[in-house]
Amino acid sequence: MTEPPASDSLQSRQSLQNHGYRQELRRSLSFADLLVYGLVFMVPIAPFGIFGSVFQSSGGMVALTYAVGMVAMMFTALSYAQMARAFPMSGSVYAYAGRGIAPPVGFLAGWMILLDYVLVPGLLYLIAGIAMNSLVPAVPVWLWLVAFVVLNTAVNYTGIRMTARVNKLMLLAELVVLAVFLVAGGVALAQGKGRGFDFTAVYNAHTFSWSLVFGAVSVAALSFLGFDGISTLAEENKDSARAIGRSMVAALLLAGALFVAQTWLASLLVPDPDRLIGRGDPDGTAFYDAARAASGAWLATLTAAATAVAWGFANSLVAQAATSRLLYAMARDGQLPSFLARVHPRHRVPVNATLLTAAVSLGLGLYMNSRDDGVTLLSSLVNFGALTTFLVLHVSVVVHYLIRRRSRDWWRHLVAPAIGFGVLAYVVVNADIAAQRLGFVWLGIGVVVLAGLLLAGRRPQLAAVAGADEPESRQVSPTQPKESA
């Protein structure tokens, strides 16, 4: 039986206090809010913008790529669920690795996830600005960037409840556009347009290899990034800590199913698949070309405009919120400047972290807009930062539960994390070489910063823990049947 929300909220507050923190953020988010947040962060129509890149890198097996990506991320979501129960606080992998393994490891995990969280809003603003400029050439990209940043910052500044309301409206709009495309595409195939129904988007014997598919997953992973952002809202979740993990899994399943459906359909409508595989999609219009083949220019314009708004407003809105919570968590522990830990007295949001995120996103977006490889460079860094941090997450589960807590839940605390680690490691190995180099350079800088802190006598520390773990984390061990309801 589900406990009343008030009881869940009280339990979460007490758990946070047991880990040495005060409840400062407003607990107002339900399971539905968390689910919507995760879906909006991932963007149900995310493949619209990178369809051509994934199609080329996968040899046309784009639906298979998204299916494999969903399975890979599902194991990561299961590990997130375990750590969210043990440590229901803001900070995501930074908090989980820091408490599950050791504070210095948490610092490096937080440093790597910054590649994802801090850079991704700038990437989203840039992609949306370019898309809007293609629709309204009279308005330059930089002006669209400024408009999106100001709008999102204003919404996030007013509080998490306003962000949640806007999320629901944006999700509904994206689903309506997706439904229009699926119906129009299905009708077009029934009328004989495209190349007819086949399974080459799932399996093509002429191009298939696991290294090819996993290399493509490293690109498609951009569409899945965001489910993990749910964990940054742990201190604003009004239900039990289990709601965090459940909402992650549910968001991944729903988004993954939508990704597979839309990319499969689009692959059947691509005007010249061999040319797309051979020459790629430098203008990023492959999906819109498929929409045009299905139902004309109106559908191509609709899908392009929806992509711009979804990436530039909806996705960037939640990305900015997640980033500010990560900065807030690290600053609260003294691992970033303390001014980032300031919470607005009325809106109960990390105000300085929100404003800094907006400033960095704007500056980054404007700079990358001046580079020919801006989108590619940012995408590579974002994906590498997220995937390598997920590897640390899986290790945290094993260390915390299996080694420290002596759990005998072999599936959740050993097998599932090991599979997740193995799949992601293979994806990282097959990722773009430039992404690997840039990612390891960033990691090297983090190691230097950590060494500097250690030499200065400022070893990363987390708040004192009153009790080894919260009650829920002890429920998983069969050695304590009294608490394993």
Image: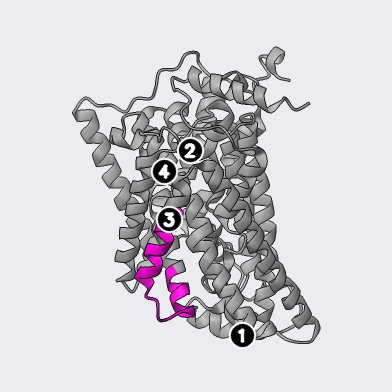
Mark 4 belongs to which amino acid?
Answer: Ser
Sequence-earlier tag: 2 or 1: 2
Secondary element under disc 3, as helix, strand or loop, is: helix
Write the residue at 18% across / 28% down. 456
Image quarter of the C terminus? top right
Separation of marks 1 and 4 at Cα, in angstroms: 39 Å
Sequence-earlier tag: 4 or 2: 2
Q: Which residue is mark 1?
A: 297
Instruction: Give the vertical position of 118 relative to 194 (above or below).
Output: above
Mark 2 belongs to which amino acid?
Answer: Ser
Q: Which residue is mark 3?
A: 120
Separation of marks 3 and 1 at Cα, in angstroms: 30 Å
Mark 1 belongs to which amino acid?
Answer: Ala
Separation of marks 3 and 4 at Cα, in angstroms: 12 Å
Closer to the camera: disc 2 or disc 1? Answer: 1
Write the residue at 64% across / 46% down. 35
Q: Is residue 80 visible?
A: yes
